[in-house]
Image: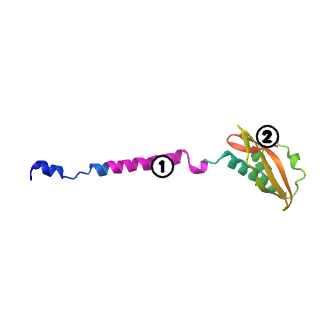
Amino acid sequence: MTDDEEQKWERTAVPFIAALAVVAVVIAGIIISQIISPAEGNVSDTEQIRIAVHEFVEARNSGDEERIRDTACAGFDDAWLADRTGNLVVEKVSEADIDGDRATTDVTTKVDDKDEKTMLWTLVKQKDAWLVCN
């Protein structure tokens, strides 16, 4: 066998190192993308509105004025809920009609498990949070 034939069959680590480098780059890319934009942060506006409605109702039911202020617009007047005394329960939040930082959605509620009523709620997005503003 000549030296040329021996070199032809000689194995090198270059392909394995290259494959390992490609895998490392892919894994690093996945990790970086999760740090920059985690999946739990990718919640749609519609889902954020549903969450905002539920948080407002929980705050109202608890009577916690600070939580109510945190979930409602400044100068919020809850007169539109005056006939909804008792424990308010959200039965359904419809698909929101979103126009920039404003949205409306039909919210169906019950009071003390009776008196089901659907009302149009208005929400405004301020500082990346949806607030109830009726």
Position in image of residue 122 (x %, y %): 79, 43
Q: Which residue is mark 1?
A: 31
Residues at marks 2 and 1, CA–CA distance in whole angstroms: 40 Å
Sequence order check, earlier mark of 2 and 1: 1
Q: Amino acid at mark 2?
A: Ala
Which contiguous range is marked in magenta?
Answer: 18-41
- Please name the residue shown 52% across and 48% down the image: 34
37 inside magenta stretch = yes
Closer-to-camera residue (90/86): 90
Circle 2/circle 1 CB separation < 8 Å: no
- Please name the residue shown 48% across and 46% down the image: 32
Quadrant of the rendering where the C terminus is positioned: top right
Q: Is residue 118 left or right of residue 97?
A: right
Q: Amino acid at mark 1?
A: Ile
- Depth check, mark 2 against mark 1: the one in front is 1
Number of residues whose C-alpha sits closer than 10 Å to that of mark 2, classed few (under 14), some (14–19) or many (20 or more): few
- Determine if residue 93 is in view: yes
Q: Which residue is mark 2?
A: 74
Helix, strand, or loop for circle 1?
Answer: helix
98 inside magenta stretch = no
Marking on residue 43: none
Q: Is residue 117 left or right of residue 39?
A: right
Q: Is residue 24 left or right of residue 134?
A: left
- Determine if residue 63 is in view: no
Position in image of residue 86 (x %, y %): 87, 58
